[in-house]
């Protein structure tokens, strides 16, 4: 199989992930979009490793590290989403940003 096929698939996956991050405001959708982008990176790493044929499997090793990083990111992200939902009843990323800004305004009013 030529190298172009997995690279084009990786480009499509990465573009879908970028679109999901830029267009959606739901925190779960943001996490899924980040996962799509990381999977595109993994596909590139494995494709270039298979293309090089050096026998060291460096691309596959790096892909395992990226998978480990993605698992940690999802665990932490889902914990934050769960706390946001329990505390405020929504998982909207824009509303969560507004909550942080409102909290800073309340703290500034208390100090003055």
Image: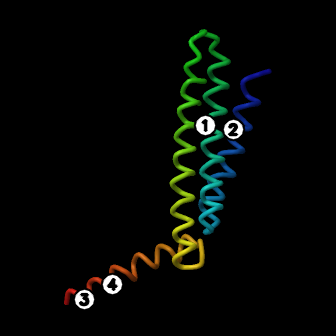
The first of marks 3 and 1 along the sequence is 1
The first of marks 2 and 4 along the sequence is 2
Identify the residue under disc 1.
41
Question: Closer to us: mark 3 or mark 1?
Answer: 3
Q: Residue 78: x and y, percent? A: 57, 58
The residue positioned 55% from the left and 51% from the top of the image is 75
The first of marks 1 and 4 along the sequence is 1
Find the distance from the CA under tag 2 to the CA under tag 1: 7 Å
Identify the residue under disc 3.
110
Cβ atoms under marks 2 and 1 closer than 8 Å: yes
> 94 or 65: nearer the eye?
65
Q: Residue 11: x and y, percent? A: 68, 41
Residue 96's disc number: none
The first of marks 2 and 1 along the sequence is 2
Q: Residues within 10 Å of mark 4 (few under 14, many from 20)?
A: few
Q: Residues within 10 Å of mark 2 (few under 14, many from 20)?
A: many
């Amino acid at each position: 199989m030529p190298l172009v096929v997995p690279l084009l698939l990786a480009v499509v996956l990465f573009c879908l992930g970028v679109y999901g991050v830029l267009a959606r405001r739901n925190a779960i959708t943001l996490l899924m979009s980040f996962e799509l982008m990381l999977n595109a990176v993994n596909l590139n790493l494995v494709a270039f490793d298979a293309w090089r044929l050096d026998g060291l499997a460096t691309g596959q090793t790096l892909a395992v590290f990226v998978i480990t990083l993605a698992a940690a990111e999802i665990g932490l992200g889902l914990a934050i989403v769960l706390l946001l939902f329990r505390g405020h009843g929504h998982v909207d990323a824009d509303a969560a940003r507004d909550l942080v800004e409102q909290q800073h305004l309340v703290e500034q009013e208390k100090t003055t």
